[in-house]
Image: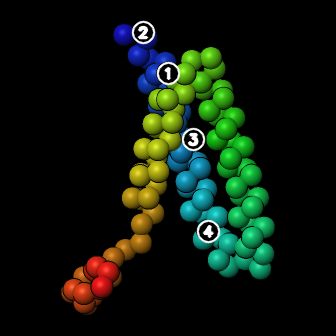
Amino acid sequence: MTDMLPLLWACVAGIALGTMFYGGLWWTIRESMASVHPALWVFISLLVRMGIALAGFYFVAGTHWERLVMCLLGFLAARGGVTWVTRLPKENAADSAPEARHAP
């Protein structure tokens, strides 16, 4: 049981890192749409988000590859969570044409 606790904490840390990374990406895109210099927003955000994520992975993993894998799994799980939370509301489904749901 004591071997599983560090792996659980690594997964939780991965979820936190992923939430920061993908939530920051969502926030950056929203802010850059109204900015005069959107490329600057995106570039600086990329550097900050990647720096924090890489430092977090390095800190969490230490010398244990198992922790790195669990942290990565949590990071990827956070992507799905942030995508689900920040999705746009669907338009009225009855208004969309059935042929618009697939490629011709």
Q: Earlier in the sequence, mark 4 or mark 1?
A: 4
Q: Earlier in the sequence, mark 3 or mark 2?
A: 2
Quadrant in which residue 88 is drawn: bottom left
Q: Earlier in the sequence, mark 3 or mark 4?
A: 3
* Residue at (58% x, 48% y) in the render: 20
**Distance between mark 2 and mark 1 Cα atoms:** 14 Å
Quadrant in which residue 30 is drawn: bottom right
**Residue 49 x/y as whole percent:** 67, 49
Q: Earlier in the sequence, mark 1 or mark 3?
A: 3
Question: In the image shown, does 43 or 33 lie closer to the viewer?
Answer: 43
Residue 17, labelled with which disc?
3
* Residue at (68% x, 47% y) in the render: 50
Residue of label 1? 66
**Distance between mark 2 and mark 4 Cα atoms:** 41 Å
**Labelled pair 2, 1 in contact (Cβ < 8 Å):** no
Q: Earlier in the sequence, mark 2 or mark 4?
A: 2
Q: Is residue 98 left or right of residue 48?
A: left
Res 53 seen here: yes
Res 15 seen here: no
Residue 55, labelled with which disc?
none
Residue 29, labelled with which disc?
4
Residue of label 2? 2
**Distance between mark 3 and mark 2 Cα atoms:** 23 Å
Q: Is residue 32 left or right of residue 20?
A: right
- Rendered position, 98 above or below 59: below
**Residue 53 x/y as whole percent:** 64, 41
**Labelled pair 3, 4 in contact (Cβ < 8 Å):** no
